Image (cartoon, rainbow, N blue to C red):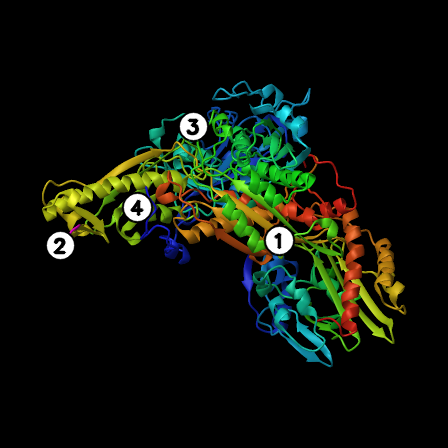
């Protein structure tokens, strides 16, 4: 594949669903709710750790308008994971549809399906429950202490793949990696840093919360319409959880109002399916915002120890990262997230002696899950802040230190082989890397040359500059698979059936662009349908920065196959050999320019005239590389040294995502991710009381930046050409979220000399730092 | 709120009669933004008071008279000599909420984080209540406790009277928040006048960070008659710290809010002083 002048790809064309969404046409699960749908409401545990000693649902069941009440006593007890991952899942099986053991404030006790929300809520109040309250684990540091309460003491809990798992010690997963001799590398260093960092809880906060509905059709199949990133995993896990064959479940994904990883989980679908079976009526369940915060999924909070050794000349001699990850009440995505802390961050810098450990522990707190960045966000904070600290110790500009050490095209890293997602990884060399240009472009934009040390700054308000370098991946190599079906219609249009899921990213448009470019037609000729497990081919779904790179290759492959069929029919119609014709502007044309037939004529010919057949094909794809996108982020802040208040003045993100298939959407992904990361760094915070109850589960108290809070922002797309990707593309959706924590943290230090090693960067923390009273880094 | 009916009177006397007749079963509503915070599920009848002609800002005998159903957005847009409430409105949640919320609704019930009570206290505003006996309640009395104490069934807050700033006076205002749409973590406002190089009069008040919006009379006493300046302001702020119990929220400690108050008291005094001197841009 060579770089060429594109006609559809690399163009900011109108999104194929733009008008539908702009006009507010029914598109989302909530828009499609049948009028007679029963409403589901869930009674949840008030205790962080407890055992139900008695439960009486009889009064609730008998209430007029109540159609069913589910609890652990009347549903199958089948252990499973809620993580929407490939099979066999790397997450432990530790969850039941309902259980008599409560493992966090918000755990499922009983569900009601009723004719109205009010009746359902009244029925919840009529359920009588008594609990034996148990001691709880509310801090990561306590989870594996001798005598700690065991959260998963049920016999069924187990790891599915051969990875360390010790439920008796609340250990949900563990991974170790050592390359070279780490301690020797530290000993060889002229300067070392050894610090603890803490990444706090954070929530995806999609505009559309989790929402699902289900009904049973006349063939006794359960039809689930749900806001999911993983329709096929959803189908498989629902069938498993209900103990029914996969063939009895159909999952339809309409438009999604944001996912960011939150919807890579089976959070509602098992219950809506069970309720549909039980009531034989359509049922609908939508999380409130409070439920979304407490009972959906979060970013895995982590305590990290980062160690770096470097020589005075800037050579990094040792790189070590130990992560203690809080997976909460279940182990969803715990192993793979912590693996990514190593695999998506540590290869960024060349080093011979590397140590990595990730230990994942259960606590009686909300569960972690997939979240944009997926471990790289946590590790980038520790590594990139520590890089600044080492640079200062050896007297180098942190930009120069990074520029000297970062991975480059042609390089490889032993980490790629050593650390995969729950298993050994895949060797790969970097085939496209424009990080050096990202650094230069970003530095120019932020005005890096004017940067001075904090010791030179005076006055109440002090400005500072900080930076961070980043990498991520593009799909999970040799694990995940995408597929696409393409068929031609009489008018020369095409149905593109995708298992991939557009969760608001615009991937339907991007994949349609790839198809149109390959076919030699316009974007308007591509009719996209995604996703429906009955109708569209299998795709793992939208996660791991995979859609453009992985599903995009499946689309490119199938479009190439269909293009060949079109050429063959067109050549036959023109009485030429296929080698004598080509496609151009929705036509097959003779290369000598003499004759041409339109796609419509070709379709009609193939359907109605001679040797009839359906022009169309299916193609699937797994990838053997996961080419990282790269980025350099820069932040400028102003710190009020009297109050500690941090004002973000400017943020620059320069990113290399290969060929941006749709440059505006790619920019949007960077800006969205950066804003996501900024608000995580600055304001987002789960507050818990001493019983493990979240005390701020709403946007009134859990604050997100809105557009009016944004600093001046600049996004720079630095093009490269990734030869393994579709039309040179790599991923872009996740990487941007990883930069704000370290870049802003470094900028605060540069402004006032306060090094914050835990988020969010509240004014109070900066004030404490200015007064030398910063508390020890620990979980919050 | 659980509304069972919606009444739309078009005259003040009609609205008052309805409210009086219905008693506790009725609730006057205008912007309805307050209802987000009311958890009462008792069935109520909403009496819409937005058609009574109680909106708009006008000069009345030298004062500003703000109709109770005037939208906060209008306070932001209004301009006249001595008008300062645009600064309060500017920090009020978001334009979406400003377009709906009314100034009256913002002060008929106060929360620790309420914005307008703090400003109205220092501006020495008066609340005009129309009822069987019409009355004017000064801000100190009105905000001394929850304002519902001032209302009988059928009474309505119809306007707020605000004296304008005059030459030699300045106004300072600060709302501490994490984002533009955040609740206040600490609100401070000051109105100060300078006569012959000394503080002639001062009203300063705090909201949020304290249980209810309140005047900081110790700061006022420490400054009236004194020569204004950073050092004197800081000394006065220290006096203010002892006057009330400062409390943190949303993850901020009591100690930090107390410290923050010491800084922001000085900030609002400085703002007001600079404006009084004609130096504020």
Q: Nearer the viewer, mark 2 or mark 1?
A: 1
Residue A592: in magenta span: yes
Q: Residues within 10 Å of mark 4 (few under 14, many from 20)?
A: many
Instruction: Name the residue nearer the viewer: A570 or A629.
Output: A629
Measured in 3D between alpha carbons, the distance from the residue under mark 2 to the one under mark 3, in whole angstroms, is 62 Å
- The quadrant of the picture occupied by the C terminus of chain B is bottom right
Choose the circle earlier in sequence order: 4 or 3.
3
Q: Secondary structure at mark 2?
A: loop
Q: Is residue A708 left or right of residue A133?
A: left
Residue B55: image quadrant is: bottom right
Residue at mark 2:
A594
Decide if residue A360 is in sight here.
Answer: yes
Q: Are marks 2 and 1 in contact (CB under 8 Å)?
A: no
Measured in 3D between alpha carbons, the distance from the residue under mark 1 to the one under mark 3, in whole angstroms, is 61 Å
Choose the circle earlier in sequence order: 1 or 3.
3
Residue at mark 4:
A515
Q: Residue A448 location in percent, x, y? A: 61, 52
Residue at mark 3:
A242
Q: Residues within 10 Å of mark 1 (few under 14, many from 20)?
A: few
Query: Do discs 4 and 2 share a chain?
Result: yes
Give the chain of mark 2.
A
Give the chain of mark 3.
A
Q: Which contiguous range is marked in magenta?
A: A590-594
Q: Nearer the viewer, mark 1 or mark 3?
A: 1
Q: Is residue A719 above or below residue A275?
A: below
Measured in 3D between alpha carbons, the distance from the residue under mark 4 to the one under mark 3, in whole angstroms, is 38 Å
């Amino acid at each position: 594949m060579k770089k060429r002048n594109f006609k559809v790809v690399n163009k900011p064309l109108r999104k194929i669903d733009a008008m539908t969404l702009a006009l507010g046409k029914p598109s989302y699960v909530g828009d499609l709710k049948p009028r007679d749908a029963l409403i589901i409401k869930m009674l949840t545990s008030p205790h962080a750790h407890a055992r139900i000693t008695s439960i009486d649902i009889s009064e609730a069941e008998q209430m007029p308008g109540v159609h069913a009440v589910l609890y652990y006593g009347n549903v199958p007890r089948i252990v499973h994971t809620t993580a929407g991952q490939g099979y066999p899942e790397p997450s432990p099986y530790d969850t039941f549809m309902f259980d008599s053991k409560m493992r966090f404030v918000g755990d499922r006790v009983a569900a009601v399906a009723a004719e109205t929300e009010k009746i359902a809520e009244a029925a919840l109040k009529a359920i009588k429950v008594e609990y034996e309250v148990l001691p709880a684990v509310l801090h990561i540091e306590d989870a594996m202490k001798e005598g700690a309460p065991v959260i998963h003491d049920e016999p069924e809990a187990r790891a599915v793949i051969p990875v360390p798992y010790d439920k008796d010690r609340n250990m949900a997963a563990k991974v170790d990696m050592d390359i070279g001799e780490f301690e020797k590398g530290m000993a060889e260093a002229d300067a070392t840093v050894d610090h603890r960092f803490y990444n706090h809880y954070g929530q995806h906060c999609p505009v559309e919360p989790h929402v699902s509905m289900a009904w049973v059709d006349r063939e006794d199949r359960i039809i689930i319409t749900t806001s999911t990133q993983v329709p096929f995993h959803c189908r498989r896990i629902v069938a498993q959880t209900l103990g029914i064959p996969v063939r009895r479940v159909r999952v339809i994904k309409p438009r999604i109002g944001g996912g960011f990883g939150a919807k890579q989980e089976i959070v509602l679908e098992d219950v809506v399916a069970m309720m549909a079976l039980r009531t034989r009526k359509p049922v609908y369940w939508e999380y409130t915002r409070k439920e979304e915060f407490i009972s959906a999924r979060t970013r895995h909070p982590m305590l990290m120890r980062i160690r770096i050794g470097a020589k005075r000349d800037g050579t990094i001699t040792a790189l070590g990262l130990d992560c203690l990850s809080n997976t909460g009440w279940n182990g969803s995505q715990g192993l793979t997230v912590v693996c990514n802390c190593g695999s998506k961050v540590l290869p960024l810098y060349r080093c011979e002696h590397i140590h990595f450990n990730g230990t994942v522990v259960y606590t009686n707190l909300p569960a972690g899950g997939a979240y944009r960045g997926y471990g790289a966000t946590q590790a980038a904070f520790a590594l990139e802040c520590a890089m600044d600290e080492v640079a200062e110790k050896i007297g180098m500009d942190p930009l120069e230190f990074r520029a000297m050490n970062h991975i480059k095209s042609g390089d490889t890293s032993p980490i790629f082989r050593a650390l995969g997602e729950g298993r050994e990884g895949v060797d790969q060399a970097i085939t496209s890397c424009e990080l050096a240009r990202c650094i230069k472009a970003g530095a120019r934009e932020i005005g890096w040359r004017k940067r001075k040390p904090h010791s030179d700054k005076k006055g109440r308000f002090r400005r500072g500059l900080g930076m961070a370098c980043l990498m991520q991946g593009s799909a999970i190599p040799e694990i995940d698979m995408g597929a696409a079906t393409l068929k031609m219609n009489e008018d020369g249009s095409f149905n593109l059936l995708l298992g991939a899921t557009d969760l608001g990213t615009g991937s339907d448009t991007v994949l349609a662009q790839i198809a149109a470019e390959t076919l030699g037609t316009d974007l308007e000729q591509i009719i996209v349908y995604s996703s429906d497990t009955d109708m569209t081919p299998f795709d793992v779904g939208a996660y791991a920065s995979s859609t453009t790179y992985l599903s995009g290759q499946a689309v490119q492959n199938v479009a190439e196959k269909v293009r060949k069929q079109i050429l063959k029919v067109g050549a036959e119609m023109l009485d030429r050999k296929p080698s004598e014709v080509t496609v151009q502007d929705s036509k097959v044309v003779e290369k000598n320019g003499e004759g041409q037939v339109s796609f419509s004529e070709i379709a009609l010919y193939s359907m109605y005239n001679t040797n009839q057949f359906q022009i169309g094909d299916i193609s699937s794809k797994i990838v053997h590389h996961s080419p990282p996108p790269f980025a350099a982020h820069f932040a400028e802040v102003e710190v009020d040294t009297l109050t500690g208040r941090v004002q973000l003045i400017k943020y620059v993100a320069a990113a290399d995502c290969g060929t941006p298939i749709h440059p505006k959407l790619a920019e949007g992904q960077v800006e969205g991710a950066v804003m996501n990361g900024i608000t995580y760094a600055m304001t987002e915070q789960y507050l818990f009381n001493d019983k493990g109850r979240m005390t701020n589960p709403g946007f009134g108290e859990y604050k997100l930046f809105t557009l009016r809070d944004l600093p001046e922002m600049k996004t720079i797309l630095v093009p490269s050409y990734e030869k393994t990707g579709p039309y040179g593309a790599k991923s872009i959706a996740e990487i941007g979220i990883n930069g704000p924590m370290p870049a802003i943290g470094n900028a605060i230090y540069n402004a006032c000399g306060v090094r914050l090693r835990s988020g969010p960067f509240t004014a109070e923390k900066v004030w404490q730092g200015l007064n030398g009273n910063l508390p020890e880094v620990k979980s919050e | 709120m659980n509304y069972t009916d919606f009444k739309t009177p078009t005259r003040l006397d009609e609205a008052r009669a309805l409210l009086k007749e219905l008693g506790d079963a009725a609730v006057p509503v205008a912007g309805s933004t307050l209802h987000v915070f009311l958890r009462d599920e008792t069935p109520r009848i909403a009496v819409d008071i937005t058609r009574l002609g109680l909106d708009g800002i006008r000069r009345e005998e030298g004062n500003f008279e703000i109709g109770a159903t005037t939208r906060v957005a209008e306070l932001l847009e209004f301009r006249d000599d001595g008008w300062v409430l645009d600064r309060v409105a500017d920090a009020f949640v978001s334009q979406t909420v400003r377009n709906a919320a009314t100034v009256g609704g913002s002060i008929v019930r106060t929360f620790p984080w309420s914005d307008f009570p703090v400003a109205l206290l220092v501006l020495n505003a008066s609340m005009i209540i129309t009822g069987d006996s019409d009355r004017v309640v000064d801000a100190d009395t009105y905000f001394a406790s929850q304002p519902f104490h001032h209302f009988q069934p059928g009474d309505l807050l119809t306007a707020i009277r605000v004296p304008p700033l005059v030459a030699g006076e300045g106004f300072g205002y600060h709302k501490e928040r994490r984002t533009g749409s955040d609740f206040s973590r600490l609100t401070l406002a000051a109105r100060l006048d300078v006569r012959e190089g000394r503080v002639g009069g001062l009203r300063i008040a705090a909201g949020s960070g304290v249980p209810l919006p309140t005047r900081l009379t110790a700061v006022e006493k420490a400054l009236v008659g004194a020569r204004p300046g950073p050092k004197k302001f800081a000394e006065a702020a220290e006096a203010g710290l002892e006057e009330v119990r400062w409390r943190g929220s949303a993850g901020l400690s009591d100690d930090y809010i107390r410290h923050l108050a010491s800084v922001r008291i000085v900030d609002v005094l400085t703002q007001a002083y600079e404006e009084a001197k004609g130096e504020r841009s």
